[in-house]
Image (cartoon, rainbow, N blue to C red):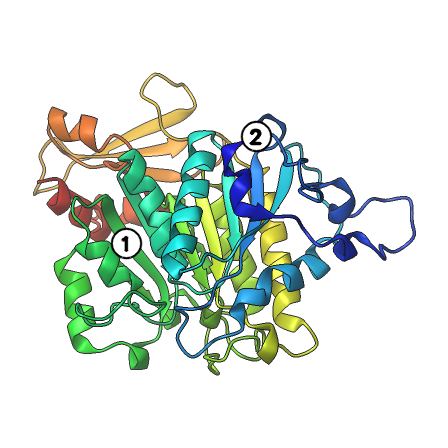
Amino acid sequence: MEIAVYFEPVAEELFEGFPAGDHLRIGQIIKAFRNEGDFPEPAGYHIALFGVNDDRNSINNQGCANAADEVRRFLYKLFPGAWTSGIADLGNIRRGFSVEDTYFALTSVVEALVANRILPVIIGGGQDLTFAMYSAYAQIGQIINMAVVDPMFDLGETNQELNSQTFLSKIIMQRPNFLFNYTNLGYQTYFVDQPGLDLMKKLLFDTYRLGMLHGNLTDAEPLVRNADLLSFDMGAIRAADAPGNANATPNGFSGDEACQIVRYAAMSDKLSSIGFFELNPLFDRNGITAHLLAQMIWYVFEGYNNRKMDFPSSDSDNFIRYIVPTTDFEDGIVFIKSRKTDRWWMEVVCGPENRQKYASHYVVPCSYSDYQVACNNEIPDRWWQVYQKLM
């Protein structure tokens, strides 16, 4: 595979010292790039794990470039689940002469993997690498939804250089633009200024405060089910559970909530890339954060292997269609429920041209509560937002 030139092999020491026993660990079954000339062929796996050792544009968190191998120390010793999908560890992308070289390499790798229907699971490095992930979709001309788990929006000022706290504004400013929707999960109001909130509202993006998701995490499921790309800032997890980040704060998601969010995301047939960023071993305590991220990645593998292939199709008997008439739309809002998983979607009204252009966007993941809202003669907010974008 041509992308092999960007990678250096996984350190051999990471495959040593497995506990004795008859049951194999992940490090003993994963197809890993361990020797030059032995790069895994794409036909042999469905999920590709790799690191990106670059933190030059991470703000106040230098040291996060060394996260990938620390996570492997814990991930490799975990037991695999009852998985049938092949998993490869491609190693670490070599640090470029400039950070732009690293971006180019990451974009090329994600583009190649997505084209081969392989799920990239990326361990950064700074969250500015999300921009390189997005650029891969721009290269192939694919319009995407992006979900970001982050305590802030990472907008910055338009004249600022690309870094871990400005990457979103750089994505928004790209022309042509391939971002259909952005969803933030877990922002904390005291880290977000009012102009940022106003911009999110103006752009019809979805933003969900940490307090809105605490205690009712099932609300996050349709949000991440709608994502093609998921970027997870480890600073979104509270410092007690994830101290390995120079920007860690007292509040945030718990460790088990973080695992649940990424499991929801990986179960989605739509998700085609996921990245974890800003884990800094220099600030970690007894490897707690690296161990947590290893467990989060375990849940990515678990979620992927539990995909049900149930994205709505008009010619399938696996779905039930409900038409809910409302005052604003006499023809009604179409809701779709999967017989296999009980998951819900809404079909947003749009013309035939937009149906073709936004084929994977006008059918929107939702929850049973959205259906109940429509039954009460109200239009769900999620439906309205997409409708305005398609108008």
> Along the horizontal axis of the image, is 68 left or right of 179?
right
| Residue annotated with mark 2 | 42
In the rendered image, the quadrant that contains the N terminus is top right
Q: Quadrant of residue 178?
A: top left
* Viewport quadrant of the C terminus: top left
Residue matched to label 1: 182
Q: Is residue 189 above or below residue 204?
A: below
Tag count:
2
> Label 1 crowding class (10 Å Cα cut-off): few <14, some 14-19, many 20+?
many
**For numbered disc 2, what is the local secondary structure?**
helix
Q: Does residue 27 appear to the left or right of 379 in the view shown?
A: right
The one of 319 and 114 positioned closer to us in this rendering = 114
Camera-side residue: 100 or 268?
Answer: 100
For the point 32% across and 46% down, which residue is it? 135
Q: Residue at x 87, y 56 (%)?
A: 19
- In the rendered image, residue 359, in percent from the top left (x then y), is placed at 25, 30
Q: Position of residue 122 (x, y in %)?
A: 51, 52
Q: Is residue 219 visible?
A: no
Which residue is located at x 38 percent, y 33 percent? Answer: 337
Give the image location of residue 242, x and y in percent: 57, 73
Is residue 391 positioned above or below 312 on the image? below
Residue 362 in the figure: left or right of residue 243: left
Circle 2 or circle 1, nearest the eye: 2
Q: Residue furthest front?
A: 97
Q: CA distance from mark 2 to mark 1?
A: 30 Å
The kind of residue tagged 2 is Pro
Choose the circle earlier in sequence order: 2 or 1.
2
Q: Residue 5 location in percent, x, y? A: 53, 41
Any mark on residue 150, and which? none
Q: Amino acid at mark 1?
A: Tyr
Q: Secondary structure at mark 1?
A: strand
